[in-house]
Amino acid sequence: MTRRKHYSTALAQAQGIVEESLRLFEIWEPDLNAAQVLELARCQGTLGVDSERRLRNIVMEGFGSRFLRKPHLEAAPSLKRLLLASHSPRFVREIILLYALRQHGIFFDFMVCCYWAAIQASGSSIDTSEITALIDRGRIEGRLQIDWSESVRRRVSSYVLGIAKDLDLVAQPSRGSWRLQSWHPQENTLLYLAYDLHFLGLSDDQVIQADEWRAFGLERPDVIMYLQRFQTNGHLLVQDSGILCRIDWKYTNRNTLIDVLLRQ
């Protein structure tokens, strides 16, 4: 499993933490777990956060839960190099977005059921009532481990839109509605995703059917189109029958992929 599907309030504790993630990657080393990163960040004043609770939430509920948990922990060393060496703030945000939506089930469903649904319907705004409706559906479908009170539902709804704002998906609210920002992932982000799924051990068919593509607004034909574009650029070879797909992967490890992404 590459993502968590249940809903929790953990998203409220960290939000987008783009700059914070970069600072924490600067001090993180492969032999450190999240608790050790927290102690190091506390001693060094890495984030300049006065509140102990806020510091713990950022490191444990944000950075640690997104990047330092299985199965994604194996990617962390190469991911550190990629994020810290990249000269594209947009690419960095999109990679952090990928790991946030994998960790937070409600944020993933917001992307699929609210954000992209509104974009495809030529909508211009979104409000918290759409997130509370999403939570209601999640409760019926068993995505909540315990039922949430009305105040918790409202609070989580606002935090979902808060992380969307941090990642440049929506703009500040006006009269209760948040303005949608038109967005589409960069090709480098999608190339990283395709190879990341492969390195996680998914079969070729599982790669193209992975949930993450939908959170990026793409269906199977779109994924095949991008894979064919990657083939044109020499990154892989793809054979698709419309039912089965076979991919010959050019890069055999994460470090080689990172070298390619940093050159582009």
Image: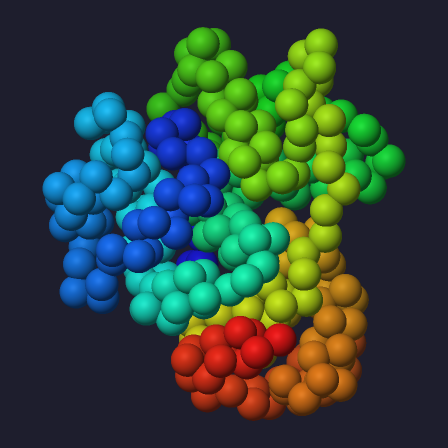
Name the foreground residue: 228 vs 20: 20
The spot of residue 74 in percent (x, y) is 32, 68
Question: Is 210 rendered above or below residue 104?
Answer: below
Image point 38% across, 34% down: which residue? 14
- Its colouring scheme is rainbow
Q: Quadrant of residue 17?
A: top left
Question: Is 4 rendered above or below residue 163?
Answer: below
The number of callouts visible is 0
Q: Quadrant of residue 76?
A: bottom left
Image point 65% across, 38% down: which residue? 169
The spot of residue 219 in percent (x, y) is 73, 59
The spot of residue 224 in percent (x, y) is 74, 73
Question: Is 215 rendered above or below residue 173?
Answer: below
Considering every residue shown, the one lying at the far right of the view is: 122
Image point 49% across, 80% down: which residue? 259
Give left or right: position of 262 versus 173: left
The spot of residue 2 in percent (x, y) is 44, 59
Question: Is 249 rendered above or below residue 13?
Answer: below
Give left or right: position of 33 versus 249: left
Give left or right: position of 210 versus 61: right
Image point 43% across, 44% down: which residue? 19
Name the foreground residue: 190 vs 255: 255
